[in-house]
Amino acid sequence: MTAPILRTPQIGDDNPILRARLHAIWETAPGWRGFLSSVDHKEIGLRYIVTAFILLACGGIEALIMRLQLAGPERRLLSPEQYNQLFSTHGMTMIFLYAAPVLSGFSNYLWPLLLGARDMAFPRLNALSYWLYLASALFLYGGFLAGAGPNDGWFNYVPYALTDYNPGYNQDVYALGMILLGASTSVGAANFIVTAMKMRAPGMSVNRIPIMVWGTLTASAANLLVVPSVSLAFFLLWLDRRFGTHFFGGMGDGQPLLWQHLFWLFGHPWVYAVVLPAMGMVSDGLPVFCRRPLVGYTLVALGTVATMILGFGVWVHHMFATGLPALSLAFFSGASFAITFPSMIALVAWVATIWLGRPVITTAFLFFASTILLFVIGGVSGIMTASVPVDLQLTDTYFIVAHLHYTLIGINLFPVVGATFFWFPKMTGRLMDERLGRWTFWIMFAGFNIAFLPMHLTGLLGMPRRIYTYPAHMGWDTLNLVTTLGSFILASGVLLFFINVARSWRGGAEAGPDPWGGPTLEWAVPSPPPPYNFAVIPTIASRHPLWEEALDEERARSSLTRGMMLDEGKETIATTPMDAEPERLVKMPGDSYAPFALTLASLLLTVSLLFQQRVAGTIALAAAGAALLFWLWPRRVMLERAEARHD
Amino acid sequence: MSAPLNYLSAAGARAQAVLPLTWFLLIVATASCLLFAYAILAALLRRRPPTEDPRAIVRGGNGVHIINLSLIATAIPLAIALVWTMVAIADTGLPPITRSLVLDITPHQWWWEVRYEGPRPSDSFLTANEIHIPVGVPVLVKLHGADVIHSFWIPQLSGKTDSIPGQINKSWMRADKPGRYRGACAEFCGAQHARMGFEVVAEPMAAFARWRQRQLQTAPPPASDLQAKGLAVVQYRCALCHSVRGTDAGSNAGPDLTHLMSRATIAATLLPNNRGALAGWVQSPQGVKPGALMPDQHLSADELNAVTAYLETLR
């Protein structure tokens, strides 16, 4: 710990000379040097989003191929093994490589702007988080393209995942790739937590934080607890496979159910981690188009946290059929019912916000508002699975496939597309095409429901999950054909969305700083924001700094154009966790190659472990050590005491 | 429309006990969706007093009471569902304590081994993929794990129970109407998870007792030269994995074939059990069920003919 800095920051007005100075201090170097070394949260956030969308397209194409196979009975487009790798890779891609990282991308881009900060708390860690994510995606997809994709589902049940039944590299690639990705998620989560606690603008007390921050903060806290534990489980699995340990085998050779407990103890909190930030997007975005504050802010924020706390006590509802004692099933059944309440808070808050507001219909609004309905559909089918005896029929049928797609597409993809329409102008300075946007919405909404609403019935008629084909005369033919048609309609909607993004990035209408008339700090800065975000650190007096005149909630007014200038080097202000009182000046690191180098070393280490190459592995470890040493080497510009002595 | 795995129709006590709760939840769920759809539309379309600037920020009502009311309204159906669930767990959890039939079932990649135990060792026998039970009698199923995890499921009689290596899980069922009920593996178990069906044949007690008696018999000796040649091939090749009681074929790695022809289907319900399908399956299981653990046989036409002729005597 360094001692608090003694210098008193200069207060001043926003002015062009100050902006020029800050620009020179914060700017990322141009060209490939800047590309590899940038620690700017906006740059990293955009990379996250673009990478996640590319992987969304990959996962979508995999889904379409599967839907062609399932369009009718006894089709032979895919071999069983091909189908099994496809559905496993589709799950892995959508859950691990799209749904969570895309939210990290938005949060990375938006958090400092929402919080009135100049960057995340640990910018280099932020860059590391992205590079590791990219490396693990390349590693996992490298396996898939080499014919060694995961083939035991994203849940990876043992003993099927062990070498007796699965001798190829498939599960090794998956296990090691997940460990690499776990490192990315863990450091990212730590960064979000510290940023939310320490980097808020003075005056932004906890009751003034945007809901999306609550969502990502809650998800990050959960991830920090569960992701390292599942990484360890994958490590044990890999030891079982390659070093003959006996954690999970069964038959006097480990315990297969241990895997399921470890996996779902992670898996269910993770499910909430990939929807809570997206729910936050709706909570923050929807009110802007209803021209009023969100109804029940405090309840919604508490509901977010409560969902996650309850979310730690429901994992066994994935395991109702495993022969656990009835009493413990009853407990987890009750907890799963109870989780309805916090979700209900958000749903009703959104409807009430529309009801009490004056809705302005835009594409973003349509995506946010439709999330409510899709969430309800995915929610009530989830409640049905909370009932143990009913779940023993529902589980592992297409009813569950329908349910989970209503939650993941309904409460992740739809809000994310809405958020893109909403924040794209901030990120690029240009508006997305509204007319094309309306088409996108209706095609996606129709296609999604055509594909997945009938799937509930397919499940009730008994179609099991994860089957590569099915016999005729089971009552599933027509329903599957409809689902296949719907999936292609949905995919064409997503394609239209991508086209819109690509076209608007260059040719969209100029957006200006605040195209929607938003309430929060990101709309107070230019679009796209300058590298330093805020010329002066704003001081916050209410939950809606930009709506204060209209709402007149507090006597005091936020100060957005006058505040701490912090222009004597790359620095920002840290505040207290609860009330956001200024606490200390923080020196921020400049661009650095260390995160990229550490990632390369980690990737090399992972590949060496996969092929059990000792020499390459030793070299990789040494390289990782060198990169860390370079990263942590003390630098004079980061020395806060020395700076203090000048004054 | 026939839908043999449809679980909204029940034919046995255990499945029947869950159906009213399932319908209750389905109706509440559907009603909630309609209610929300209506609420969203109503909120969008409701009349509002005109204003000069439609984009002006309005503080509006606080609205928290709407959330509070909805939470109370949610609690009522949830409380009913919770209590009903607990009652249903108790109702369906264990078989009634009456004298029941006990079956030992071991799912394998990708077929079902079924063992019937009798009071004496000579009353026990093995069969596969077709489970006969008497109507009206509770049947306790002990599920043994052998290779990977599978899940035992007969939608119209009983919900799922996994079979897990290293533990014995229990399930039970009681068929209340005679009939053939289809079952399937419900836990992903590898390449041919999709082709791991079975059938439960529920028949009156007398018919069941006759069936059981016949299953105890050993295979008849071959009645012709062709059948004798077929038996020789079976003992030489099939015996590595299969049993035919009364012959030298005695391995239990694959399904017991002693009464093969008494079963309506082969290859875990994939094919009808007729001469053509049988010959095709024996010769080329990998063409029919790629990844199945039975290798292609490459028999000569004469051998295949003889094997099929012999297998057809296993009634």
Image (tube, coloured by chain):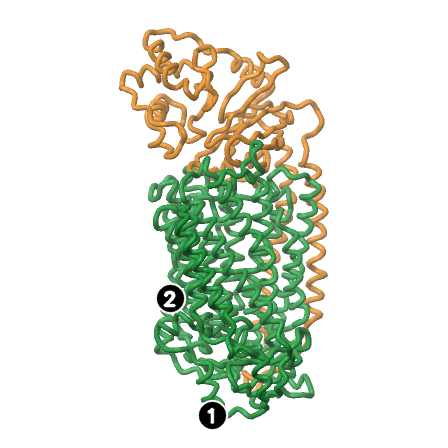
Chain colours: A green, B orange
Residue at mark 2: A496
Query: How far apart, in angstroms, are the residues tagged by discs 2 and 1?
Result: 40 Å
In the rendered view, does A330 fall on the left or right side of A322?
right
Query: Which residue shows up at 57% across the image and 82% down it?
Result: A642
- Can you give x and y, in whole percent of width and height, for residue A135 in the image? 42, 59
Query: Which residue shows up at 57% across the image and 12% down it?
Result: B122
Tag 2 and tag 1 share a subunit: yes
**Which is more toward the observer, A198 or A305?**
A198
Quadrant showing the C terminus of chain B: top left
Q: Amino acid at mark 2?
A: Leu
What is the quadrant of residue B33 in the picture? bottom right
Looking at the image, is A312 positioned above or below residue A247?
below
Looking at the image, is B232 positioned above or below residue A522?
above
Residue at mark 1: A16
Q: Residues within 10 Å of mark 1 (few under 14, many from 20)?
A: few
- Can you give x and y, in whole percent of width and height, for residue A379 in the image? 59, 56
Q: Given this view, does label 2 or label 1 mark the residue nearer the observer? A: 1
Q: Amino acid at mark 1?
A: Pro
**Could you say whether the residue bearing mark 1 is in a helix, strand or loop?**
helix
Q: Residues within 10 Å of mark 2 (few under 14, many from 20)?
A: some
In the rendered view, does B92 fall on the left or right side of A519?
right
Using the image, name the chain to which the residue with label 2 belongs: A
Using the image, name the chain to which the residue with label 1 belongs: A
In the rendered view, does A557 fall on the left or right side of B153?
right
**Which is more toward the observer, A169 or A488?**
A169
Res. B154 in view: no
Query: Which residue shows up at 56% across the image and 23% down it?
Result: B203
